[in-house]
Image (spheres, helix red, strand yellow):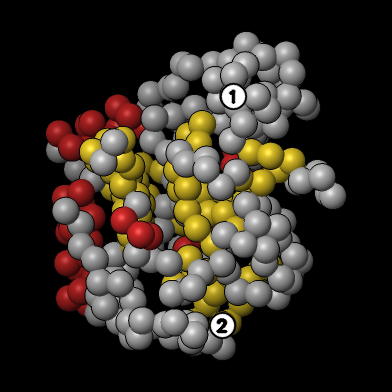
Amino acid sequence: MNGSRIALCDDYEHPDSIEYILESVLMPSDDSLDFERLADEYNSVLLNQCFCNGACENSEICPHGAQYECLTDGGELVLRKSSNPVIECNDLCKCSRTTCSNRLVQYGPRENLEIFDSPVYKSKGLRTTVNIPEGGYICEYAGELLTASEAKRRLKINEELGVMNYVLVLNEYTSEKKQQVTIVDPSRRGNIGRYLNHSCEPNCHIAAVRIDCPIPKIGIFAARDIRAQEELCFHYGGEGQYKKVTDGKTCLCAAPNCMGFMPNTAIE
């Protein structure tokens, strides 16, 4: 994204015939003012660097720090429950990559994820082949970054064709006021994040993560400890913070408290 120098590692690929991308990219230009604003944000760089010479684990010292914590039993960095949104250290920061504990999403998805044919959802799904601790990073929900007007246009076409919508809308608030809206569509270009299904009792949740750009990455994290071979799911309604646009289809998650249908949402 925007010429990032950070080495993102992602060795996964699609079983479907769409373009695999490592992180979210701009939609094709439609010459609108909304696209110009989106492109300006996409090509901007965050300048709030840190000057740490330690691990960036203390928020009183590092302006970005204390958003992840290190597990004592294995050393994996996990997201703190109260950390949302997240700002990671980046290439402008003075801290060392080898000691910084505030760099996680920028390195790409975790290993040992597997796209498979889900018997529950009768579709492709994503599962883990190893245990994942609560707060563990899964992957980015990556796709094309859209303007609201383009998202509505694509949704209308999908509805007419009767095909699935992958559009996800991330709303960020400050003191109950909406500050930023990020819209991602992985239907044409995307990564493994597009294969996570909906669950009324999900084992994953989403957090906004910024690294070197004002537009956040939509990071997917473990909402609880997840066992090996467990399918990874998040709630498409997002409790107001994010929403994946659906048409109220029947929910297949089979959770004990399943609502019976997926959330029916629309882009404002």
CA gap between label 1 and label 2 equals: 41 Å
Residue 170 rendering spot, x and y as whole percentages:
34, 49
Q: In this orientation, which residue lies closer to the viewer: 264 or 154?
A: 264
Residue 246 % position (x, y): 29, 71
Classify 12 as above or below 97: below
Please, what secondary structure does the residue beneath circle 1 have?
loop
Residues packed near mark 1 inside 10 Å, few (<14), some (14 to 19) or many (20 plus):
few
Asked whether, in this view, residue 68 is left or right of residue 130, the answer is left
> Residue at image x 30%, y 27%?
40
130 displayed left or right of 110: right
Find disc 1 in the rendering and name its residue: 59
* Disc assigned to residue 213: none
Q: Earlier in the sequence, mark 1 or mark 2?
A: 1
Q: Which of these two is toward me, 134 or 156?
A: 134
**Amino acid type of the residue tagged 1 in the rendering:** Ser
Q: Nearer the viewer, residue 240 or 191?
A: 240
How many other residues sit within 10 Å of disc 2, few (<14), some (14-19) or many (≥20)?
some
Q: Does residue 45 lie above or below 157 as drawn?
A: above
User: Do the numbered discs 1 and 2 sit on residues whose CB atoms are within 8 Å?
Assistant: no
Which residue bears the numbered disc 2? 118
At 58% from the left and 82% from the top, the residue drawn is 117
The amino acid type of the residue labelled 2 equals: Ser
- Residue at the image position 64 percent from the left and 38 percent from the top: 68
Can residue 3 be spotted in the picture?
A: no
Q: Is residue 256 visible?
A: yes
Between label 1 and label 2, give the one nearer the viewer: 1
Q: Position of residue 116 (x, y in %)?
A: 61, 77
Q: Is residue 55 left or right of residue 206?
A: right
